[in-house]
Image (cartoon, rainbow, N blue to C red):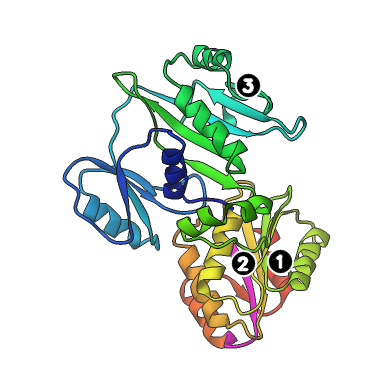
């Protein structure tokens, strides 16, 4: 289960990782000083898309982001700093033991940063002072022990499969503060953390998303139709990057969630959506697509037939979204684009 940034920071606070002061809001608020406004979405690259802004006018900034379809915001105090680092904790799949990944360079494009060093910290002994010393020496900072122990606890006690801070800020006076959070809880271990899930107000999501290796994102309603669409993309010369089954009766929020999930995979260059509606309403699907494309900037090709199909197609055409009656034409145009 992916956590929103503000949820991840609630966990950070619980395990002793310093975070900026902030509030979560779904509407414009007044703020007396310089602040950072962050859209709360379950996806990365928000900074590149203008969804993280440093501002002197919080109220106006939130109002502008709401026009893009963003519903929830984290507003935090602005933290001046001199350096940005990267640090994360996760389980090494080969050894089944925790590791700390650290880099002297944080911020955007961490994926292309080759300056990342791995520190293995076996579970049977936990973090020792020499681990802290080694990582501090590598990063060129002091006082990182609470950060390390906090991240380690999230992996070993909260069953997080990833706990990441990027950037980890170093201030003028040497304080170290987590400016961002990325926490993914292991779905198969959520039953051990019912109190936490309840406190966050979340429900475990059905796992209808699967990631592959290509560049075409696929969305369908129903496992059979979704698999058939993936096969057609492959047969017609494409290569699926991931797929998401929105299931039967999906409303606009479910559709929006699916598109955002599919697009959060950075390999996805285009999306093919194949909807054969029965209890699902085409106009609800169309509204979900329109809402999602206010946030996601990836071409989408939609085959849409079934209940309220005329209204659904009208909504898509009026918003400049390619819509088709047959899947072959839809996939063909997507692959030729």
Q: Which mark is residue 119?
A: 3
Residue 255 or residue 21, whichever sits in front: 21
Question: Residue sitting at 81 percent across and 63 percent down?
Answer: 231
Measured Cα–Cα span from mark 3 to mark 1: 45 Å
Residue furthest to the right: 235
Q: Is residue 326 left or right of residue 110?
A: right
Q: Which mark is drawn over residue 331?
A: 1
Say above or below: 195 vs 103.
Answer: below
Q: Are marks 1 and 2 in contact (CB under 8 Å)?
A: yes
Q: Is residue 154 left or right of residue 146?
A: right
Q: On the rendered structure, is 184 left or right of 293?
A: right
Q: Which residues are magenta?
A: 299-309
Query: Which of these two is toward me, 236 or 85?
Result: 85
x%, y% of residue 3? Answer: 51, 50
Q: Secondary structure at mark 2?
A: strand
Q: Position of residue 249 (x, y in %)?
A: 61, 80
């Amino acid at each position: 289960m992916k956590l929103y940034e503000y949820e991840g920071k609630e966990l950070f606070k619980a395990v002793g990782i310093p975070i900026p002061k902030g509030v979560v809001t779904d509407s414009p608020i007044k703020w007396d000083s310089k602040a950072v406004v962050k859209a709360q979405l379950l996806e990365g690259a928000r900074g590149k898309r203008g969804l993280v802004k440093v501002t002197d006018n919080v109220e106006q900034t939130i109002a502008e982001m709401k026009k893009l379809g963003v519903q929830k915001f984290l507003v935090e105090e602005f933290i001046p700093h001199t350096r940005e680092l990267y640090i994360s904790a996760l389980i090494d799949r080969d050894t089944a033991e925790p590791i700390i990944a650290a880099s002297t360079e944080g911020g955007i494009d961490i994926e292309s940063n080759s300056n990342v060093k791995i520190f293995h910290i076996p579970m049977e002994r936990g973090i020792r002072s020499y681990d802290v010393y080694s990582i501090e020496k590598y990063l060129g900072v002091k006082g990182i022990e609470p950060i390390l122990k906090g991240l380690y606890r999230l992996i070993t006690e909260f069953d997080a499969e990833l706990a990441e801070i990027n950037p980890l800020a170093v201030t003028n006076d040497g304080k170290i503060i987590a400016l961002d959070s990325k926490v993914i809880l292991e779905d198969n271990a959520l039953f051990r953390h019912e109190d936490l899930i309840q406190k966050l107000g979340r429900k475990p999501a059905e796992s209808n998303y699967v990631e592959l290796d290509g560049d075409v994102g696929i969305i369908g309603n129903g496992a059979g139709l979704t698999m058939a669409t993936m096969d057609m993309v492959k047969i017609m010369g494409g290569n699926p990057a991931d797929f998401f089954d929105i299931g039967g009766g999906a409303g606009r929020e479910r559709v929006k969630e699916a598109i955002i999930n599919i697009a959060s995979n950075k390999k996805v260059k285009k999306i093919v959506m194949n909807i054969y509606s029965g209890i699902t309403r085409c106009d609800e699907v169309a509204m979900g697509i329109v809402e999602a494309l206010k946030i996601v900037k990836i071409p989408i090709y939609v085959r849409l037939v079934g209940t309220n199909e005329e209204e659904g197609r009208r909504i898509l055409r009026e918003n400049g979204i390619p819509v088709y009656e047959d899947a072959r034409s839809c996939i063909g145009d997507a692959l030729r684009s």
